[in-house]
Image (cartoon, rainbow, N blue to C red):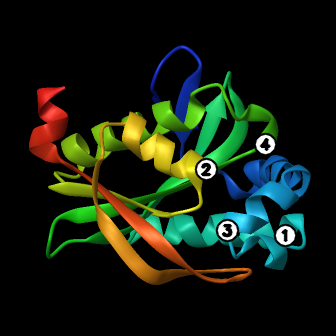
């Protein structure tokens, strides 16, 4: 397994579709009510095979340098995912997306995973700016961005389509030079 160790508890790993699909699907199933509010793709994920197909696709995107999706491991067990959803090579930036199983919320896992992705992005990919987009009402995601030292750039009106309609979206960013100072 190709992993990036953040600390003694949290690591990021490239997904292994045949191995990781079942545990990730189970986490999504257990956390369905909480995740579907913020992630429009959750209701369409119906089987382990759907998750395996998704993981295979993200590995292809990784190979084509379009995105980087990783499994979040907490004490060597999959608990969610975090990604650079897409790389904007023209502007040397990327946006981070993440989800975490409900029973693991409150352990600082996503905050540490975001910090790890920032290190990877700024050092390995030479990114200039990393963004996090979060619906205004998504208090936890906005707190993650704030705690990770991201700057609130502004609000995009009706920019995020969720299950119940369009929501205003906060845009947070962290510049490489800001990250280097910390």
Measure how far apart labels 1 and 2 are at the Cα level. 17 Å
Measure how far apart labels 3 and 4 are at the Cα level. 13 Å
Q: Residue 108's quadrant in the figure?
A: top right
Measure how far apart labels 4 and 2 are at the Cα level. 13 Å
> Which residue is more in the foreground, 172 or 57?
172
Task: Give the SS element for disc 3.
Answer: loop
Nearer mark to the viewer, of 4 and 1: 4
> Which residue is more in the foreground, 178 or 143?
143
Identify whether 61 is placed above or below 76.
Answer: below
User: How would you rate the neighbour count of disc 4 (Cα within 10 Å): few for under 14, some for 14-19, many for 20 or more?
Assistant: some
Location of mark 4 (residue): 102
Please tell me which residue is depicted at 74% across the width and 33% down the height of the picture: 104
Location of mark 3 (residue): 39
Residue 32 placement, left or right of 121: right
Please tell me which residue is depicted at 21% across the width and 45% down the height of the picture: 122
Location of mark 2 (residue): 81
Please tell me which residue is depicted at 59% across the width and 73% down the height of the picture: 57
- On residue 49, which mark appears? 1
């Amino acid at each position: 397994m190709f992993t990036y160790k953040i600390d003694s508890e949290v690591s990021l790993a490239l997904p292994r579709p045949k191995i990781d699909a079942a545990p990730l699907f189970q986490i999504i199933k257990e956390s369905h009510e909480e995740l579907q509010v913020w992630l429009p793709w959750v209701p369409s994920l119906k089987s382990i095979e759907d998750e395996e197909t998704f993981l295979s696709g993200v590995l292809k995107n990784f190979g084509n340098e379009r995105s980087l999706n990783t499994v979040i491991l907490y004490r060597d067990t999959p608990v969610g995912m975090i990604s650079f959803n897409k790389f904007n090579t023209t502007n040397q930036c990327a946006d981070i997306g993440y989800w975490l199983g409900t029973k693991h919320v409150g352990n600082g896992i996503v905050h540490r995973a975001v910090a790890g992705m920032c290190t990877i992005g700024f050092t390995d990919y030479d990114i200039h700016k990393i963004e996090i987009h979060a619906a205004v009402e998504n208090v936890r995601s906005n707190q993650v961005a704030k705690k990770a030292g991201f700057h609130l750039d502004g609000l995009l009106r009706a920019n995020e389509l969720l299950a119940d309609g369009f929501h205003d979206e906060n845009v947070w960013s962290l510049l490489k030079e800001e990250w280097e100072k910390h």
